[in-house]
Image (cartoon, grey):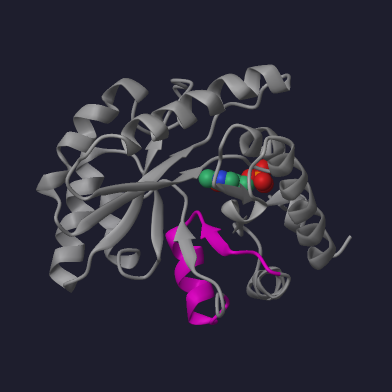
């Protein structure tokens, strides 16, 4: 299957999952998770109609940007970002999806202010409290959001989560539902610099479940580009 065929099939499956629960398929964006795929593959995915690209590593982001790989689509940062690398990411991506600590918020705010811009971000939630994953705890969210007034050079557009791979849809739905409840809850409240309208969840193995539970952005790598070559 070519990248274009994969993107077309995924879009059909997004539509099917959305319509089944009475959602408009246009409310769900497809973000191509492009890690370990080269500039040509990225260009092909953009030509095939993905809405944005998500990059995990600063070095790959910088390298593909220098090759003009993302022309025609916004690029997001979706990997763990170290505070000493914010300079290479702030102002260079449309959205940082993976903001996982107050320290990182402080560093992003400082760099964005220095550049005279406002950086859009998502807050990453470690929804299943996994040791191996970063992100805020669900219980911390209210406290974090109430502090966003301290960061005038940051705008929070929503939440991102990477729930564990589950055995079945029922298990999956539990975590996705928690994230959906969080975003609905926060939308009803008012916090400075917070404008929640993105809920980024769902990957190759579980995006239909995520769409059923209210995801507005799925991040798909393997199902678009094939298995990654780690050799
Ligand atoms: C790699 C990655 C994805 C996509 O994973 P696939 O299973 O290949 O679709 C999504 N989100 C993040 C943060 C990733 O690192």
Q: For the point 63% across and 39% down, which residue is it?
A: 211
The verdict on residue 57 being magenta is yes
Residue 34 image-quadrant placement: bottom right
Horizontal side of 45 relative to 187 (left or right) equals: right
Part of the protein shown in magenta? 49-69
Residue 222, can we see it?
yes
Residue 132, can we see it?
no
Q: For the point 79% across and 53% down, which residue is it?
A: 12
- Name the quadrant of the N terminus: bottom right
Query: Residue 172 in the image: x percent, y percent?
Result: 63, 24
Query: Residue 52 in the image: x percent, y percent?
Result: 56, 64
Q: Is 186 located above or below residue 36 in the figure?
A: above
Horizontal side of 101 relative to 94 (left or right) equals: left
Q: For the point 64% across and 17% down, which residue is it?
A: 171
Camera-side residue of 210 and 124: 210
Query: Residue 67 in the image: x percent, y percent?
Result: 54, 81
């Amino acid at each position: 299957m070519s990248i274009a065929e994969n993107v077309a099939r995924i879009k059909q499956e997004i539509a099917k999952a959305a319509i089944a629960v009475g959602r408009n398929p246009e409310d769900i964006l497809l973000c191509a998770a492009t890690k370990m795929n080269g500039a040509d593959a990225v260009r092909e995915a953009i030509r095939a109609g993905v809405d944005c690209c998500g990059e995990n590593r600063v070095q790959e982001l910088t390298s593909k940007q220098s090759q003009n790989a993302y022309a025609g689509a916004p690029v997001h940062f979706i990997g763990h970002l170290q505070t000493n690398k914010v300079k290479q990411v702030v102002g260079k991506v449309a959205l940082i999806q993976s903001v996982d600590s107050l320290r990182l918020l402080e560093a992003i705010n400082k760099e964005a202010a220095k550049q005279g811009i406002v950086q859009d971000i998502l807050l990453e939630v470690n929804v299943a409290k996994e040791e191996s994953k970063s992100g805020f705890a669900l219980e911390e969210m209210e406290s974090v959001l109430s502090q966003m007034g301290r960061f005038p050079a940051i705008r929070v557009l929503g939440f991102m989560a990477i729930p564990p791979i589950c055995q079945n849809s029922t298990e999956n739905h539990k975590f996705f539902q928690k994230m959906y409840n969080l975003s609905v809850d926060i939308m009803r409240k008012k916090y400075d610099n917070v404008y929640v309208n993105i809920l980024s969840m769902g990957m190759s193995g579980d995006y239909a479940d995520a769409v059923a539970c209210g995801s507005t952005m799925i991040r798909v790598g393997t199902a678009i580009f094939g298995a990654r070559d780690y050799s």
